[in-house]
Image (tube, helix red, strand yellow):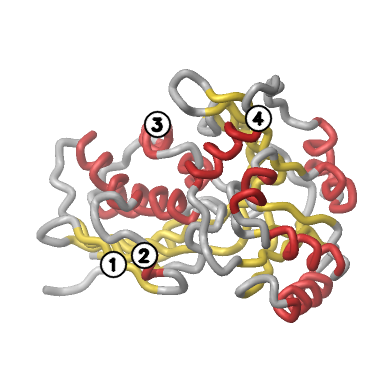
């Protein structure tokens, strides 16, 4: 038997970051949108825990127990007193180390796939609890849609979205470490008073109305200065996207992928073509939001 789960990428349309907490994390007001770029995680019985990966950037994905998908399988097995004897195959399409929660998506996908493979019927609340232990973005990868994440991002409140939003994602030639970006944020804000992170009502209203023009004026990312400090060429990518008639652009999460909000599918194709032609990114992808969270797409049974 094997179980395949599809999991979405995310874009942060608002990422408000508070000062560092004593535990090293930061309080956030993190408005997530799931977007239609997906990884697939397939779980198959095995003699021991094994990870394989294929697709763009697969050579950058760890295949040992540091992989978030492996940690998810171990955490779920541990909760139920099982041995995590499973082969997890990750089919990558979400940019690796791109600020779009690809690793978190794989963890959520592994949780759901292993839960189905092992016939555990773990409650949604317990799955979300395991997700929160694994990482701040993992709960949203399970839930999808749109949500406001508070605390360190793991406490989710679903949000209404009144329409479809069109995006172009410029994939950088290289990656950024999320912890490194937060360290740079702390360095840049050292000695300054960092305000309490709060969700923008203007942004939430724009989402609820499905108003792309209003959403464009409200996009924000407090980590963007830190990402630009560590990866200065992203400024050229942002300028190229805006020059190509995008409504707005920002660094996606901790970067280095940059996200451009556009009017419609036709505009998305034009902006993507212009970004690639500008030479400021490795490739450009188009997608829409919101998208569903982790979803079982195939259950296959084979004779042995």
Alpha carbons under labels 2 and 4: distance apart? 37 Å
Q: Earlier in the sequence, mark 1 or mark 2?
A: 1
When asked about the image quadrant of residue 185, the answer is top right
Tell me the residue that label 4 is attached to. 189
Tell me the residue that label 2 is attached to. 90
| Numbered mark located on residue 129 in the image | 3
Question: At x 29% / y 49%, what residue is drawn?
Answer: 66
Q: Check disc 2 and report its element: helix, strand or loop.
A: strand
Tell us which disc is closer to us: 4 or 3: 4
Tell whether label 1 touches label 3 (CB within 8 Å): no
Q: Position of residue 202 (x, y in %)?
A: 85, 35
- Which quarter of the figure is the N terminus placed in? bottom left
Q: Earlier in the sequence, mark 4 or mark 1?
A: 1
Tell whether label 2 touches label 1 (CB within 8 Å): yes
Q: Check disc 4 and report its element: helix, strand or loop.
A: loop
Frontmost residue, 149 versus 19: 19
Tell us which disc is closer to us: 2 or 3: 2
Q: Position of residue 151 (x, y in %)?
A: 55, 25
Q: Position of residue 275 (x, y in %)?
A: 74, 73
Q: Check disc 3 and report its element: helix, strand or loop.
A: helix
When asked about the image quadrant of residue 148, the answer is top right
Tell me the residue that label 1 is attached to. 52
Q: Position of residue 27 (x, y in %)?
A: 58, 26
Q: Earlier in the sequence, mark 3 or mark 1?
A: 1
Question: At x 51% / y 32%, what residue is drawn?
Answer: 154
Tell whether label 3 touches label 4 (CB within 8 Å): no
Image-based side of 21 in relation to 260, left or right: left
């Amino acid at each position: 038997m094997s179980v395949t789960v599809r999991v979405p990428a995310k874009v942060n349309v608002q990422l408000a970051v508070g000062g560092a907490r004593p535990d090293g994390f930061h309080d956030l007001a993190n408005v997530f949108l799931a977007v239609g770029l997906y990884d697939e995680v397939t779980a198959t019985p095995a003699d021991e825990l094994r990870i394989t990966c294929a697709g763009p950037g697969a050579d950058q994905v760890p295949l040992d127990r540091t992989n978030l998908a492996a940690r998810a399988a171990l955490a779920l097995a541990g909760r139920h007193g099982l041995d995590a004897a499973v082969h997890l195959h990750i089919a990558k399409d979400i940019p690796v180390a791109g600020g779009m929660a690809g690793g978190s998506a794989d963890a959520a996908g592994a949780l759901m796939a292993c839960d189905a493979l092992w016939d555990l019927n773990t409650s949604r609340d317990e799955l979300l609890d395991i997700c929160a232990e694994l990482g701040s973005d993992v709960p949203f990868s399970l839930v999808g849609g749109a949500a406001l994440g508070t605390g360190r991002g793991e406490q989710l409140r679903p949000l209404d979205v009144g329409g479809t939003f069109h995006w172009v994602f410029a994939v950088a030639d290289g990656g950024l470490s999320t912890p490194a970006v937060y360290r740079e944020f702390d360095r840049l804000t050292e000695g300054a008073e960092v305000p309490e992170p709060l969700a923008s009502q203007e942004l939430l209203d724009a989402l609820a109305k499905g108003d792309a023009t209003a959403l464009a004026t409200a996009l924000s990312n407090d980590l963007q200065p830190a990402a630009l400090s560590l990866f200065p060429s992203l400024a050229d990518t942002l300028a190229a996207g805006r020059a190509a008639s995008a409504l707005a652009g920002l660094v996606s999460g901790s970067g280095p992928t940059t996200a451009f909000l556009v009017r419609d599918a036709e505009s998305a194709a034009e902006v993507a073509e212009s970004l690639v032609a500008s030479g400021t990114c490795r490739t450009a992808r188009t997608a829409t939001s919101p998208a569903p969270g982790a979803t079982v797409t195939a259950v296959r049974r084979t004779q042995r």
